[in-house]
Image: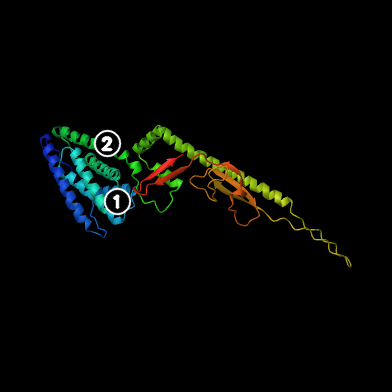
Amino acid sequence: MIKKIDIKSKKTVIIGSVILVIVLCAALALGVSANKGAQETETYDYNETEQALAEEVKEYLSQYMSLPEHTSNVIADAAVQNYNIVIESGTDVINDEITDAVRKRIRSTIFAFADNPEQLTDDTLDALSSGVTEIIWNAVLQQLTQSGVIISEEQKEEYEYLIQSLQGQIDALRERKSKISIQANITDNTDRDITGDELLAGIDNLSDEEIRALAEKLGISAEQFREWIEASMNQSNTNIKELEDEINKMRKELEKEISSVSGKPGVAGKTGEKGATGATGAAGNDGKTTYIAYADDAYGSNFSLVPTETSKYIGTCISNDKQQPKDYKMYSNWQEYRTYIITSTTNQDTGVTTVHIN
């Protein structure tokens, strides 16, 4: 059964809001205390709407934190509990006090169950709790607009007032989250290197507000930022394809040249009564192999046999060696195959990862 919020007279707005804040604060103390002692994975009995809300919260958190299943479920359940408290309260307005009470409860739950709470800065907790609260309010708004409640003319004004207050809180949370969430990625990446593809995938997953915030830091518009990323990727792919074609062409020409200087077998002597066998031709030259390597510049800086996040140049080496040479001095004909690099740095104290595009 889908729950509905009852629309009441404006006279009860202030009283209802205060009562709702008190209920939420009480639930904060009881909920965190009760869940703190539970260690095994709980089984939650949700309806379709509650299940969708829990899954959306867990998916959101997974973008920023590495959480055990139990911890993820507990935080998602806190979101569902807050949703139900608001739905069943019959409040006529969602104001700053209600939003703050919900956000504080989510914040406390995240801090209480995180594996490394010392890595959670105030800004990070603010961003994550604001994001989860935004999801809760979107669920409440969807419930109101899709529940099929028939609003009378007398109730219409109160209903619209509630919808407007909800939308205002959602907008404020979205703006609050977007100011911080770009630096709020606290997933533990300290034991591995982040690849350029992963960083680009992270950019693809940014919301419109986050892209605008990042673009502002770079001094360009959001549209210019998108076009720049797309153009950089296209140019990089084009450069790599052209270089691969050139290397394949050069390899074929070298193989043809080496084959042309190989010795040919001598003509066998005619068999006579006691005829001598013709002289054997000289042995052909050993085939050579073309190897490629990567570096940050045309002088072989930060030499590597495989592409790295900072490599921009590619060089070639033609050798008889069966294994690829590891001495950068043996490589030449360095060619630039891309014009930008993507790197990242991780603050060991806060766990915050920052993307650098140069």
Residue at 48 percent across and 36 percent down: it is 231
Front-lying residue, 310 or 86: 310
Rendered image: mark on residue 241: none
Residue type marked 2: Asp
Whole-percent x and y of residue 112? 25, 52
Residue at 66 percent across and 53 percent down: it is 288
Whole-percent x and y of residue 177? 30, 40
The residue indicated by pointer 2 is 171
Residue at 44 percent across and 40 percent down: it is 357
- Spatial distance from mark 2 to mark 1, Cα to Cα? 30 Å
Farthest residue to the front: give it: 349
- For this view, does 6 lie left or right of residue 196? left
Farthest residue to the bottom: give it: 274
Q: Secondary structure at mark 1?
A: helix
Residue at 17 percent across and 33 percent down: it is 156
* Label 2 crowd (10 A; few <14 / some 14-19 / many >=20): few
Rendered image: mark on residue 118: 1
Whole-percent x and y of residue 187? 35, 50
Q: Is residue 221 above or below residue 37?
A: above
Tag nearer the camera, 2 or 1? 1
Residue type marked 1: Glu
Farthest residue to the right: give it: 273
- For this view, does 43 lie left or right of residue 255? left
| Mark found first going from the N terminus, 2 or 1 | 1
Whole-percent x and y of residue 267? 81, 58
Front-lying residue, 8 or 188: 188
Displayed quadrant of residue 101: top left
Q: Colour scheme in the image?
A: rainbow
Q: Is residue 94 visible to the viewer in this orientation of the structure? A: no
- For this view, does 195 lie left or right of residue 325? left
Displayed quadrant of residue 38: bottom left
Q: Secondary structure at mark 2?
A: helix
